[in-house]
Image: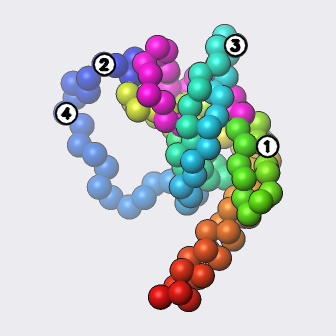
Amino acid sequence: MDVNKKNESNEQPYKGKERRSASRLAVDANCILLLEDSHEVPVKIENLSFAGAFAAFDHDDRDFFINQRVWLKFTLKINKEIHKIEISGIIIRANNFGVGIAFRTSEREAVEPVMEKLTEYIQSNRAKKFDLE
């Protein structure tokens, strides 16, 4: 799928119930997206779940394809703790702004502890914010 091609089918955006199997958390992490041909693409992880991520980019020097295998390498700092993540997945969504990636099922356990800490951190900050109001 060439992400630069326009949608000629007049598809309407999905307006029903959320179809994702895992809730996503907003993050802002610089990342290297490694392709099968060893090409490295700098991207930014905008949201993350234990099942996948959305990687945004501001360039169009590569074509991305559905079911293309990729590897992600990034670091998240959560509550002064640094977590290095290296995980593979496949592209399940692609557009001019980024790619949606589903992590391989066998590798999801690598992300689960980080997701738990990130969820706790976000909930703790929300609670603090409500306490201040």
Local packing at callout 2 (Cα closer than 10 Å; few below 14, some 14-19, many 20+) is: few
Q: CA distance from mark 3 to mark 1?
A: 20 Å
Q: Amino acid at mark 4?
A: Asn
Q: CA distance from mark 4 to mark 2?
A: 13 Å
Q: Amino acid at mark 1?
A: Lys
Answer above or below: position of 90 versus 3: below
Secondary structure character of the magenta stretch overall: loop
Local packing at callout 4 (Cα closer than 10 Å; few below 14, some 14-19, many 20+) is: few
Q: Range of the magenta residues? A: 55-73
Residue 121 spot, x, y in % from top left: 67, 69
Precedes in sequence: disc 3 or disc 4: 4
Give the residue at mark 3.
Answer: 38
Q: Which mark is residue 5?
A: 2
Which residue occupies 61% across, 68% down? 122
Q: Which mark is residue 84?
A: 1
Answer above or below: position of 79 versus 45: below
Looking at the image, residue 59 sits to the left or right of residue 48; the answer is: left
Q: Secondary structure at mark 2?
A: loop
Which residue occupies 28% across, 46% down? 13
Q: CA distance from mark 3 to mark 2?
A: 25 Å
Q: CA distance from mark 1 to mark 2?
A: 35 Å
Precedes in sequence: disc 4 or disc 1: 4
Would residue 53 be visible to someone looking at this image?
no
Question: Do the CB atoms of the residues marked 3 and 1 lie less than 8 Å apart?
Answer: no
